[in-house]
Amino acid sequence: MNEIVAFNVRRQLRLSGKKQGELVAVLKEPKRNILRMLSGAQELPLPVLKKISHFCNSSIDSFFLEPEQSSSIHEAFMGQVSSSEGKKSLDIVRQLSDIYLFHSQYQTAEFSNLVNKNWNE
């Protein structure tokens, strides 16, 4: 659970355009403790979460939501793609896998129809 909360806190910081250094200054806690909390190695106490939610202008409930799983297996393997070359490569991989999946499904259906037709004749 610590990792989920830490992931959501980092995501809220990124969405609100805030930096970890600003968060350390607001929380007035040792930087080491904040970094441990943001990595999920240490539990984030509720009073600290309340301060973070005010700092990010978000609700505390948003920190406890499970992150969405990647809908694409390609994104799971490639991770976050930020360069234009990486995005082009990801698009090519998606197109190729879609083509492969379409043809494998079509050929499988065509093959089964062919086999059934031969046995029925």
Image (tube, helix red, strand yellow):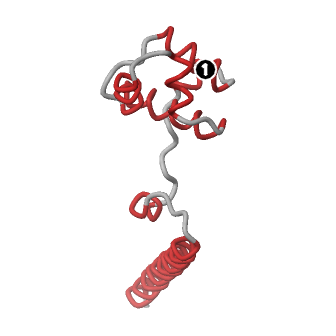
For the point 40% across and 86% down, the residue is 115
Which quarter of the image is occupied by the N terminus? top left
From the viewer's side, name the closer residue of 57 and 73: 57
Residue picked out by circle 1: 53
Name the quadrant containing residue 37. top left
Say few, some or many: other residues with alpha carbon within 10 Å of mark 1 (under 14 / 14 to 19 / 20 or more).
some
Describe residue 74's horizontal placement relative to residue 19 as left or right: left
From the viewer's side, name the closer residue of 53 and 76: 53
Provide residue 68's location: percent of width, then percent of height: 52, 42
From the viewer's side, name the closer residue of 60 and 115: 60
Describe residue 115's horizontal placement relative to residue 98 as left or right: left
Provide residue 15's location: percent of width, then percent of height: 64, 39
What's the amino acid at mark 1?
Ser
Q: Residue furthest left?
A: 41
From the viewer's side, name the closer residue of 73 and 40: 40
Q: How many marks?
A: 1
For the point 34% across and 26% down, the residue is 32
Provide residue 113's location: percent of width, then percent of height: 47, 83
Describe residue 48's horizontal placement relative to residue 43 as left or right: right
For the point 61% across and 20% down, the residue is 53
Provide residue 34's location: percent of width, then percent of height: 41, 24
For the point 58% across and 19% down, the residue is 61
